[in-house]
Image (spheres, rainbow, N blue to C red):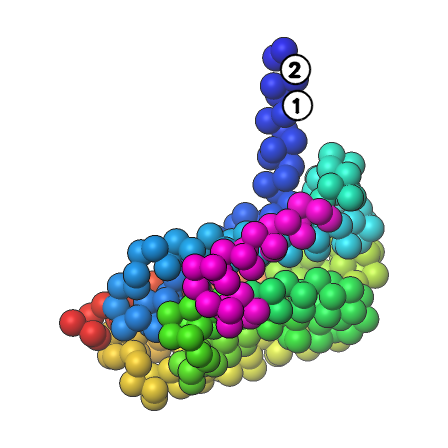
Amino acid sequence: MATRTLTSSGLVGDYIALTKPRIVVLLAFTALSGMFLASRGAPDLALTLVVLTAGSLAAGGANALNHVLDRDIDGRMGRTLDRPMVRGAVGIGHAMWFGILLNVIAFALLVLFANSLSAVLTLSATLFYVFVYTKMLKRTTSQNIVIGGAAGAIPPVVAWAAVTGEIGIPAVILFAIVFLWTPPHFWALALLLKDDYADAGVPMLPVVAGVQATKAAIFRYSWLLIASTLALFLTRDVGYVYLGGAVILGLGFAYYAYKLLRLPDVQGAKATYLYSLAYLGLLFVVMIVDSVVHNL
């Protein structure tokens, strides 16, 4: 009986691992910030729960399908050897249907309790991530994460659409912020894992263009990212609390990117990667705070 319980518990953990929960949490947080911005303050609680639940299910389902399609690559990379699909802990068919089911539930929730636009946007993000990024781009071009990052930039747009029923200019800028954040964030990680990617035959930028070219690209994108965050202030949907936070956080990003550019080899890549994670979370925290203060 004890062995069976442990096995069941382990299987549940494997299914949870398929969803890449840490990524899901970050995406859900960007959606929450989008809801605050669209609502000009605290959003409706019921609608918030629907959007966050549906968004998390859809993202988790997309990640599960990604696990299925990338199982051969994951088996050749040190950091992914323990993933459920590589270990054979979850069957291919089971994982596929799990990912599909999560997206079906997410779509239904949004159609029934939000609106069709938010549902279609969410499903589109999953389809783009699975078929365009995972199936087409990841294995064929060093610009894979640049284009593929569009899928991860959809959650705040979904949130805006759920609240307003449309896609406004602020939603487009929110998309741009996450879209432009994704390459420097991921390239910093790719610098640390360039040998893994080379062994797996994945043409990430450090593998194809080299370390120095990747560091230069991170630096350039840091300034594009800063520009996109400042563009949101021009809409007047955010106030000076957001502006101050965006400037301070943006300069911090540029500092880490510049330091990475000047240091030899991949020194500074881990610090840049960790800062990029903190950066996005803090930027959207500032956006939430500003939404409340700005609309008092």
Q: Nearer the viewer, residue 210 or 51?
A: 51
Q: Quadrant of the C terminus?
A: bottom left
Q: Quadrant of the N terminus?
A: top right
Magenta stretch secondary structure, dominant: helix
Find the magenta span and give its range: 96-121
Q: Residue furthest left?
A: 296
Residue found 56% across the figure and 59% down from its top: 107
What amino acid is labelled 1 in the image? Thr
Residue at the farthest front position: 112
Residue 78 is marked as none
Q: Disc 1 designates what residue?
A: 7
Percent x, y of residue 174: 45, 76
Q: Is label 2 in a helix, a strand or a loop?
A: helix
Q: Is residue 208 left or right of residue 239?
A: right
Instruction: Name the spot of residue 97 as percent of width and height, x first.
Output: 71, 47
Could you tell me if the residues under marks 1 and 2 are in contact, i.e. CB atoms within 8 Å?
A: yes
Residue position marked by numbered label 2 in the rendering: 3
Asked if residue 254 lies in the magenta stretch, the reply is no
Residue 282 in sight? no
Q: Is residue 237 left or right of residue 207?
A: left
> Residue 130 in the image: x percent, y percent?
70, 62
Cα distance between the residues tagged 1 and 2: 6 Å
Instruction: Rate crowding at label 1 as few (under 14), some (14 to 19) or many (20 or more) other CA atoms within 10 Å.
Output: few
Residue positioned 54% across, 57% down in the render: 108
Where 164 sits versus 76, above or below? Answer: below
Which residue is rendered at x = 61% and y = 19% of the image? 5
Which type of secondary structure does the marked residue at label 1 adopt? helix
Mark 2 burial class by Cα count in 10 Å: few <14, some 14-19, many 20+: few
